[in-house]
Amino acid sequence: MPVIQVTMLKGRTVEQKRKLAERLTQAMVEEAKATKEAVTITFIEVSREDYASAGVLMEDRK
C-alpha cells in the first residue's frame, strides 16, 4: 500500500489538490505497478513561518 505524503505551503485550492492526487496516483500505477485503490495520499499544509529552506524561514523570504 503506497502512501505519498505531500508537504507544501498553505494556499493551494481544492481543485489543485484534486489534480495532484490524480496525477500522483497515476504515476504510482504506471511506474510502481501499484493498483489505484492501494495508493493513499495525504496533503500536509504548513504556514510560511513553519517552513524553512537553507536555514531561512519562508516567512523571511517575502
Image: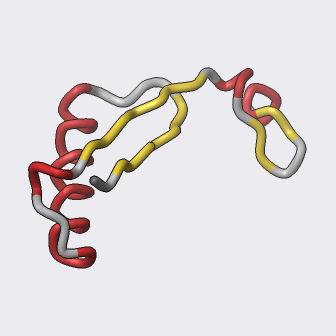
Residue 44 relative to residue 55: left or right: left
Q: Nearer the viewer, residue 10 or 23?
A: 23
Q: Nearer the viewer, residue 50 or 59?
A: 50
What residue is rendered at 81% in x and 33% in y?
A: 57
Q: Which residue appears farthest toward the front when viewing the image?
A: 1
Q: x, y (%) of residue 21?
A: 23, 45
Residue 18 relative to residue 41: left or right: left
Q: x, y (%) of residue 30?
A: 17, 75
What residue is rendered at 37% in x and 30% in y?
A: 12
Vertical order, 50 against 53 (above or below): above
Q: x, y (%) of residue 31?
A: 25, 78
What residue is rendered at 71% in x and 33% in y?
A: 51
Question: How many discs appear?
Answer: 0
Choose top left, top right, bottom left or bottom right for residue 59: top right
Q: Identify the coloring.
A: secondary structure
Q: Nearer the viewer, residue 21 or 59?
A: 21
Quadrant of the drawing holding the C terminus: top right
Q: x, y (%) of residue 37?
A: 10, 49
Q: Nearer the viewer, residue 37 or 57?
A: 37
What residue is rendered at 85% in x and 51% in y?
A: 54
Vertical order, 60 against 38 (above or below): above
